[in-house]
Amino acid sequence: MDIYLVRHPQPADVGGLCYGRLDVAVTPQAIAAAAEAVWAQIPDETLDCARIYCSPSPRCVGLARHIASPREPMPAEDLMEMNFGQWQGLAWDAVPRQQIDAWAKDVWGYRPGGGESAEMVAARWQRWLSQLPRISGGGVVAVTHAGVIRVALACSGRLDAVSALEATVPFGSVHHLDVV
């Protein structure tokens, strides 16, 4: 099964901020630009018949609706961004250095800000993935977040666990997985 993971459009005014699951504004222009990038990277025949899923985060729903139109995307809680707990809403440079260091020492098991670990995000990803064959027979497009995409790349074996969590995942980027 072909799965296309799409990162949401760039939010406005979040430079240097750990926003995680916070609802942050995305302009209509950013949604339109991200949609153009998606349409350029995913074949029309796939987009025409693919099931479109998204994180329930407004920045994902907006793009998913744009690319799915006139259909409605299906929100999936398992596609939510990693929960950064007490770090959410803080500037990255305000997060205590010892906490950043602890995360760097255990990138899969550490729970940033007391929220979720990458292992926990991986469990959500695997749960969502395991449900797909029962509910979707063709291609899948999922508009989600960088954290989920990084974990999916690691779980698929496309990247090793550590480099996946450090991978650059640009806004509006598309990542193709062929899942058996």
Image (cartoon, rainbow, N blue to C red):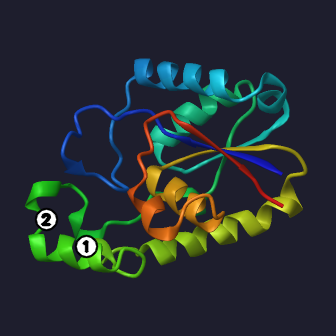
Q: Residue 22 appears at what percent x and percent y?
A: 33, 52
Relative to residue 19, is residue 34 depicted above or below?
above
- Residue at 43%, 21% (x, y): give it: 28
Separation of residues labelled 1 and 2 (CA atoms): 9 Å
- Asked whether the viewer can see residue 12, the reply is yes
Which mark, residue 26?
Answer: none
Q: In which quarter of the image is residue 10?
A: top left
Relative to residue 20, is residue 104 depicted above or below?
below
Q: Please state if 65 lies on the left or on the right of 103 as rendered.
A: right
Which mark, residue 95?
Answer: 2
Q: Residue 32 appears at what percent x and percent y?
A: 51, 19
Relative to residue 172, is residue 21 depicted above or below?
below
Evaluate if marks 1 and 2 touch, with contact meaning CB atoms under 8 Å apart: yes
Which mark, residue 113?
Answer: 1
- Asked whether the viewer can see residue 77, the reply is no
- Which kind of residue does numbered mark 2 sit on? Val
Disc 1 crowd rating (10 Å Cα; few below 14, some 14-19, many 20+) is some
Q: In which quarter of the image is residue 108?
A: bottom left
- Which kind of residue does numbered mark 1 sit on? Gly
Tell me which numbered mark, 1 or 2, is placed earlier along the sequence: 2
Relative to residue 156, is residue 40 depicted above or below?
above
- Residue at 61%, 35% (x, y): give it: 64
Q: Please state if 112 lies on the left or on the right of 95 as rendered.
A: right
Q: Residue 169 appears at what percent x and percent y?
A: 45, 44
Q: Is mark 1 on a helix, strand or loop?
A: helix
Q: In which quarter of the image is residue 156?
A: bottom right
- Residue at 29%, 52% (x, y): give it: 19
